[in-house]
Amino acid sequence: MSMNLLEGKRGIITGALDENSIAWKTALKAKEQGAKFVLTNAPIAMRMGAIQDLAKECDTIVVPADATSVEDIEKLYAEAKEFLGGNFDFILHSIGMSPNVRKGREYGDLNYDWVQKSWDVSALSFHKMMQVAEKQDVMNEWGSIIGLSYIAAQRVYPFYSDMAEAKAILESIARSYGYRFGKLKNVRVNTISQSPTKTTAGTGIGGFDAFYNYAEALSPLGNAPSEACADYIIAMFSDLTRYVNMQNLFHDGGYSCTGITEAIVDKFSDK
């Protein structure tokens, strides 16, 4: 249902790979709420997904860009600003990748070149996007920038490997740039720590089903679906959340605050 929460707002949505991705669902909801935006993803990811179909549905364009490349980000912003007819009110950073996880390397046997790639893609790209935005002065006053995180930034999830550090860096960058951008232009920067979600990227992590089922049993509301996360992102892009800044916001059905539940007790109790 449209409430025109983003009427007249312009922005950039990264990372929409296919209909399972949170960024994809966010784009559909942003369109529904009156926003105009540009889609972007790395060229290699675009070949794997169907982002052009999403662009047609949202009456927009796709600008290929590698978010680890400052030059690509500069080109993205220039083309997006021309297409949108002005500066941006929101940016969604929905980017994450670990070669070590993809290739099954144990945490005690990491390839350090791959670690640096993980951090560059999954975290440092967030800083690069904001630094270029600041230097080009493309964010409007009271804009909103969101990065997608996960609770492994605070707690140990063995199979999440070096992505845990990447998410911790991502959240730290959000705090530091949230202070800086807040002082400069009243732009707020936050991360959303989502439940385990059955996206293409999520299900590629070893042990994902166990993550998902355990969180479902521990969360009083159950795991938050991707559609609900997209709703939350839209709320964070809207003027209703103008004074939320520098936060890591848990969107997980209560999982992050729950120690144990009856379902868990029953599962492990001696019968």
Image: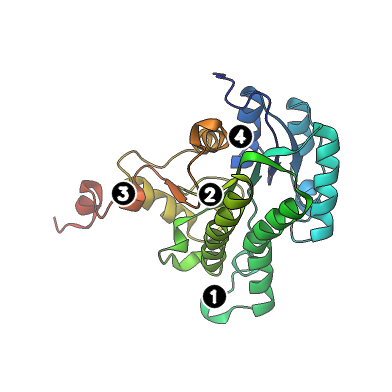
Check disc 1 and report the residue beneath it: 106
Cα–Cα span, label 3 and label 1: 27 Å
In front of the other: 211 or 137: 137
Mark in the foreground, 3 or 1: 3
Which numbered dot is residue 218? 3
Q: Earlier in the sequence, mark 3 or mark 1?
A: 1
Give the class, few, some or many, for how many residues have Cα within 10 Å of label 3's Cα (few <14, many ≥20): many
Q: Which residue does the image show at 76% across and 55% down from the upper left? A: 135
Work out how far the residue at label 4 is from the one at label 3, CA to CA, in angstroms.
25 Å
Q: Quadrant of the N terminus?
A: top right
Q: Marks 4 and 1: which is nearer the front?
A: 4
Query: Counting other residues with Cα less than 10 Å from the Cα at mark 1, is it few (<14), some (14-19), or many (20 or more)?
Result: some
Please report the residue visible at 63 percent of the width from the left and 23 percent of the height from the top. Answer: 32
CB contact under 8 Å: marks 3 and 1: no
Query: Which residue is label 2 attached to?
Result: 190
Q: Quadrant of residue 170?
A: bottom right
